[in-house]
Amino acid sequence: METLRVDLGERSYPIHIGEGILSLAGEFLQQAGLRGKVAVVTNPTVAQLYLDPLHEVLTRSGFAVTPILLPEGEEHKDLKSLSVIYDRLIGERFERKSSILALGGGVIGDLAGFAAATYLRGVPYVQVPTTLLAQVDSSVGGKTGVNHHEGKNLIGAFYQPKLVLIDIAVLNTLPRRELVAGLAEVIKYGIIDDPALFGLLEKEMQKIIGLDRELLARIIATSCAIKARVVEKDEREEEYRAVLNFGHTVGHALEAVTGYTGFLHGEAVGVGMVKAAAISMQQGFCDEKDFARVRKLVEKAGLPVGIPSDVRMQDLIQSMEVDKKSGGGKIKFVICAGIGKTRFHWLTPGEILGALGA
Ligand code: NAD
Ligand code: GLY
């Protein structure tokens, strides 16, 4: 087992990573100072796989468990699901010292985290991420929230968990498409910060997709460590934390114009990273070799690399312009300045359009 730490003063917390550590959840929650009532927020798919054993270990450690099952899917990351959580917490008389545990992917983590940030003006919560994406990205860093029909993640709060528990064994049941989507974020960490991670992915991608335990533990720990360092520098995304959005400007736009049904988030980020690398090359920040490596690795993971022919480039640009990261007619882009290095650069829609076909 490996333990990392997110260092944020009084909001610091550990990330425990290991195989089978769900069975130690009771002890870890106690160590984090949690007692009494705990609401386990999850969905039917994840509940069927992991709720009973978790319920049992928590009960054995003296916790009074209230399972809260929410409907599955991104379309339910909304205020209605949030109300379901609040209703149960109020119904079960949850107090300031009671806690919430998110058992699931990023949808559950964001919902449970936001409920924790707002119920009684804040109760402690624990992230138990069960998708690769949630293990390497959404469970760490304290971004919580829900969608509004006008856009994704428009309602939310920065609110750090007390503890993140990453059990690699749960990836055994994750559909391959979801696993691969999570790999997009791991590739992203290599591009923005870590040439050695990028090289490891180039060398071992097939073994990783085959769920090699040691490699999974290594890439998850490395990803979490990179994310932790970024969050420590800029918890509330004043500026630097936006490096985590590499590939996300085009990715988000692609998700939006395809009605959030064409691509999983990680798949859209795969395309977005290839396009961001192409733009970086065209603007002279990285060379053709870097671009080719990014494209090849995204492809090797089994992620898409191109924009579907029925997507209109103008629609994509328009979607980027209304994205919250844009301003003053130009769009703020995270540029690849060679594998492991990034910088910000403002680009006109024309400059972006030029690279989208690459
Ligand atoms: P998800 O939560 O929808 O999970 C994907 C699917 O996998 C679901 O159907 C789920 O039921 C299933 N599943 C989860 N764990 C499983 C397991 N172990 N075995 C079998 N099936 C399992 O998707 P996601 O990709 O984890 O998260 C996407 C969400 O995360 C989006 O809402 C996005 O906005 C959010 N997000 C948040 C942050 C952040 O910093 N807070 C960062 C990135 C993404
Ligand atoms: N997923 C981007 C962030 O946490 O900032």
Image (cartoon, rainbow, N blue to C red):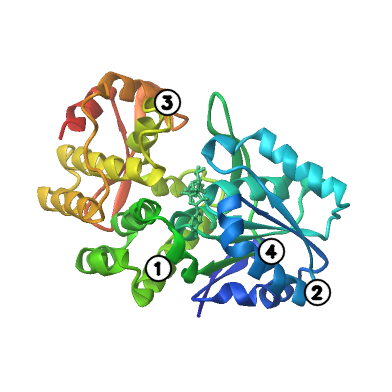
- The mark nearer the N terminus, 1 or 4, is 4
Percent coordinates x, y for residue 235 in the rendering = 55, 52
Q: Residues within 10 Å of mark 2 (few under 14, many from 20)?
A: some
Q: CA distance from mark 2 to mark 1?
A: 33 Å
Query: Can you name the residue that lies furthest to the left here?
Result: 288
User: Which image quadrant for residue 26?
Assistant: bottom right
Q: Which mark is residue 132?
A: none
Three-letter code for the amino acid on which mark 3 is drawn: Gly
> Is the residue marked 4 within 8 Å of ligand 2, measured from its CB?
no
Which mark lies nearer to you, 1 or 4?
1
Q: Residue at x 56, y 62 (%)?
A: 49
Query: Which residue has dot 2 on it?
Result: 62
Residue 142 as seen in the image, left or right of residue 30:
left
- The mark nearer the N terminus, 2 or 1, is 2
Three-letter code for the amino acid on which mark 2 is drawn: Gly
Q: Residue at x 66, y 66 (%)?
A: 52
Q: CA distance from mark 3 to mark 2?
A: 52 Å
Query: Which residue has dot 4 on it?
Result: 10
Percent coordinates x, y for residue 193 in the rendering = 33, 59
- The mark nearer the N terminus, 2 or 4, is 4
Residue 350 as seen in the image, left or right of residue 95:
left
Three-letter code for the amino acid on which mark 1 is drawn: Thr
Query: Which residue has dot 3 on it?
Result: 327
Which mark lies nearer to you, 3 or 2?
2
